[in-house]
Amino acid sequence: MTLSVYGKYLCWALMRVSLICIGTKMPAWVEEGIAEYRKRLPAEINFEVKELPLPKRGKNTDIRRAIAQEGEAMVAAIPVGDRVIALDVLGKPVSTESLSEALRNWQMDGDNVSILVGGPDGLSDTCLSLARQKWSLSAMTLPHPLVRVIFAEQLYRAWTILNNHPSHR
């Protein structure tokens, strides 16, 4: 994304933020929540959610192999050139303000971003090593459908901070 000046206004070129998640068939409230925050975001920020199927698991499933399969699918879904960030319970806690600063930097640097959300057993080592940063949304374990809505809301809130919008409080 690049910054342009038109008259007295600063205008950002289009950037994409992709939330790449393991798991499909989310409840309606997840889809509605994401749609609501996507609608609130400006046209300059294209927020997309890429849902990848959870491989079948049974009581004899090799969990390490399942995590590796999920990782391969996630890596294949990351657009070339994206900045990659992994959401991981052991990651650095991220605040709304630090997300806002990251959003500003992504815009200034012209970055598109892929945020990785693993399956029930977390992210593969490949995904974690590919990530420039590892973030934790909470010290608590959050259900994966809720993570999608929380991230969408926090991205919107980060944008409101950058634009001095009163709704960020």
Image (cartoon, rainbow, N blue to C red):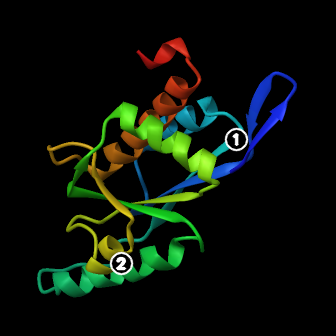
Name the spot of residue 149 as percent of width and height, x first.
41, 40
Name the spot of residue 28 as percent of width and height, x first.
45, 42
Kindly state the secondary structure of the residue where label 1 is placed. Answer: loop
Q: Which residue is mark 2?
A: 71
Q: Is residue 167 left or right of residue 89?
A: right
Q: Residue visible at 47% across and 32% down?
A: 158
Q: Residue visible at 37% across and 32% down?
A: 96
Q: Residue visible at 51% across and 79% down?
A: 76
Is residue 132 in view from this perspective? Answer: yes
Kindly state the secondary structure of the residue where label 2 is placed. Answer: helix
Relative to 88, does residue 55 appear above or below in the rendering?
below
Name the spot of residue 92 as percent of width and height, x first.
24, 50
Relative to 133, does residue 146 appear above or below in the rendering?
above
- Which of the two discs, 2 and 1, labels the residue nearer the N terminus? 1
Specify few, some or many for label 1: CA neighbours under 10 Å numbering under 14, 14-19, or 20 or more: some
The front one of 52 and 99 is: 99
Q: Residue furthest top?
A: 166
Query: Dividing the image into 4 quarters, which one contains the C terminus?
Result: top left
Q: Which residue is mark 1?
A: 44
